[in-house]
Amino acid sequence: MIAALWKPVQRDAGRHYTWGGDNDGWHLLQRHDLSVIAEHVAPGGREQRHHHGHARQFFYIVSGRAVIELAGREVALAAGQGLEIPPGLPHRFSNPFDEAVDFLVVSQPSTRGDRTDD
């Protein structure tokens, strides 16, 4: 178990999934109490509005720009900016821009089984 602490994590095929057509995600850390995902969203990509009953999330933009709809209000984010989303708050990540966006989403606890589409 402790040997895994010294093994770097990277985006690779074994951790990869796709969503919404042209969008990619990589599970960097998958535990029941904490999840870290790297995502790449193509121009025009967006997710379904939803909320989590227990998970608190933090979205951090690595490159590009994005908009997060949060309880009916839009918050624009650029590279180097992040936004916390508390449990129960409806939200939707979108990329209405002409360039792809790369970001990290950290969830505590994991969102597995904790998502309800609105």
Image (cartoon, rainbow, N blue to C red):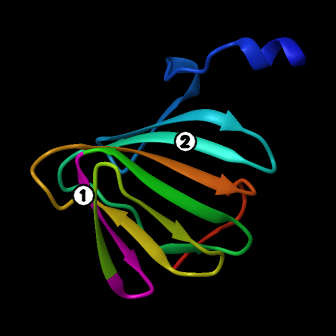
Mark 1: secondary structure: loop
Percent x, y for residue 12? Answer: 50, 19
Residue 103 at x, y = what percent? Answer: 40, 45
The correct choice, above or below, for 41 with respect to 48 in the image is above
Which residue sits at x=73%, y=13%? Answer: 6
Q: Nearer the viewer, residue 49 or 105?
A: 105
Residue 38 coordinates in the image, percent (x, y): 47, 38
Dot 2 amino acid type:
Ile
Q: Main secondary structure of the magenta part?
A: strand
Q: Amino acid at mark 1?
A: Asn
Foreground residue, 116 or 29? 29
Residue 81 left/right relative to 5: left
Q: Nearer the viewer, residue 98 or 2?
A: 2
Residue at image mark 1: 95
Question: Farthest residue in the left direction?
Answer: 98
In the image, which residues are magenta? 64-73
Residue behind mark 2: 37
For the N terminus, the quadrant is top right
The quarter of the picture where residue 72 lies is: bottom left
Using a 10 Å C-alpha cutoff, classify the residue at mark 2 as few (fewer than 14 neighbours), some (14 to 19) or many (20 or more).
some
